[in-house]
Amino acid sequence: MKERIIAPTIFAAGFIAGLSGGIHSLAATDTHVAGNTSATSQPANARAVGSITSFSARPRTRFQIDDTSYQVQGAGRSWSLSSPDSRTLRFEIRPGDYAWFDSSTVDRSEIASDQLIMSGTSAKIAYTFMLEPGVANTASWFVTAELHNEDEALGPNVHTSPPFAIELAGEHLRIVARHCPTGLDPSNRAGNLKILTLWTDPNPIRRGEFYDIKIQANLDNTSNGHLYVWANGDQVVNYHGPLGYGAPIYWEEGLYRSADASQTVAASFRNLRITTGRDDL
């Protein structure tokens, strides 16, 4: 588990998430059953969840969210990526916005974590997401967040789709999972993938409103795998079974779509928190 522990006082993650970005000096008192209140503790420094430091919007560069570095992947336009405050990232794509490693068949503005999560390791991911008002999405596929496979671990020239993705299908959020047995080629062209649509929101996305997303996953491509997802406090996915390709994964967020859409799309992500090695939220 990769999580900051504050001593001598431990503060609830939800409380820390509500603070503005940066370091905060916090102190606490304890009220006993009899009504007696202890002396105020010595202040302890706590960093707000999802703190962005050393921000850069230039493709191929890196910045920090909490203790993890993230690579900027996009077209490097003036609108592609910004940080309105120290816990928020704003992504925007327009037709023709693809990264240095892409072809012109996609539009992309994303960040990718350098933290690898090993197959069979439990991970918790929490963040809030808001799609800005705009023209309805018409892309044939559109990914807003994903756990992506470390393709190099599967061999040279292997390129895979994410084993877990939160997508935009038209104007509806959708959760898709994929798995492939160990030893088989998980590339789309190989025909070995099992693709599962685990949830499609029956209601159109409410543009301009933040969605609170929580994910608990164990990407294990055996019967030990599982995936639970909550949106605004409601559990929308409760899946047990094979998940992933048996290789390490990493977190990506932002906007990534097929280039068959003409709309400008923008979204904000904030309060990202990732911990590993625990099944509880």
Image (tube, rainbow, N blue to C red):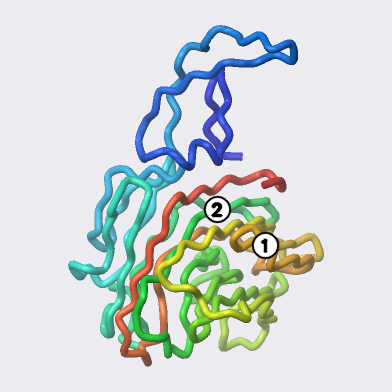
Above or below, comparing residue 84 to residue 199 in the picture: above
The residue shown at (42%, 54%) is 270
Secondary element type, mark 1? strand
Q: Find the distance from the CA under tag 2 to the CA under tag 1.
A: 14 Å
Residue denoted by label 2: 126
Secondary element type, mark 2? strand
Give the mark nearer the N terminus: 2 vs 1. 2
Verify CB contact (< 8 Å) between mark 2 and mark 1: no
Counting from the top left corner in percent of width and height, residue 261 is at 36, 90
* Residue situated in front as seen by the camera: 270 or 95: 270
Image quarter of the N terminus = top right
The residue shown at (37%, 92%) is 260
Q: Nearer the viewer, mark 2 or mark 1?
A: 1
Quick one: label 2, few (<14), some, or many (20+) residues within 10 Å?
some
The residue shown at (30%, 49%) is 85
Counting from the top left corner in percent of width and height, residue 3 is at 55, 37
The residue shown at (46%, 41%) is 18
Q: Amino acid at mark 2?
A: Ala
Q: Amino acid at mark 1?
A: Asp
Residue denoted by label 1: 234
Q: Residue lying farthest front?
A: 35
